[in-house]
Amino acid sequence: MGRLDYFLAKVGLFVAMMVAVTYLDPRSQWVKVIGMVLSYVSFALDVMRLRSIGLSQWWSAARFVPYVNLLYMIFLQSAPAGWAETRRMDRAGKTLFVFQLALLAVAIFMLTKMRVAVPYFVF
């Protein structure tokens, strides 16, 4: 699974969940079931992407570690297919990686300026 396919699939899952929450009662059992199904599909997408990169699917457990999952998702979206053989990012991967890290830094900066309680270990 390539970077673009992975990204578009993740966006599709997000849109599907937003549609479910919008048109159904957010507290309903249907939204819970849809959320569980979409979580499973998201996990399966991560495993497929890890195989495409050339890493073990066991790395998908990193998505359950708080704050590590942010870097994990950025890496999955940035690494080119076959990354495990070369251990190098291509130009597009480097650009995506830096851009997403910058977005994460801006989000953390905005949270601190809004005086939202952010755990100290985020920084």
Image (cartoon, grey):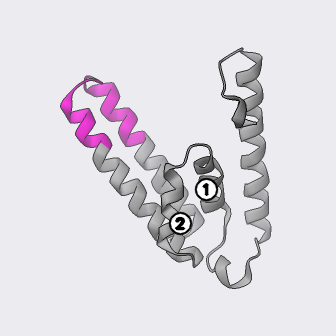
Which residue is drawn at the image coordinates 62% and 50% (left, top)? 68
Q: What residue is pinned by disc 1? A: 72
**Distance from label 1 to label 2 (Cα)?**
9 Å
Q: Position of residue 65 (x, y in %)?
A: 54, 49
In the orientation shown, which residue stands out farthest toward the front? 121
Which residue is drawn at the image coordinates 74% and 24% (left, top)? 110
Which residue is drawn at the image coordinates 57% and 62% (left, top)? 4
Residue 16 falls within the magenta-colored stretch: yes
| Mark 1 element type | helix
Q: What residue is pinned by disc 2? A: 59
Which-is-in-front pick, marks 1 and 2? 2
Asked if residue 69 lies left or right of residue 113, the reply is left
Front in this rendered view, residue 39 or 8: 39
Q: Position of residue 102 (x, y in %)?
A: 78, 43
Q: Position of residue 48 (x, y in %)?
A: 46, 70
Q: Kindly indicate whether the residue at mark 2 contacts the one at mark 1 (C-beta within 8 angstroms).
A: yes
Q: Amino acid at mark 2?
A: Trp
Stretch in magenta: 15-35
Which residue is drawn at the image coordinates 75% and 22% (left, top)? 112
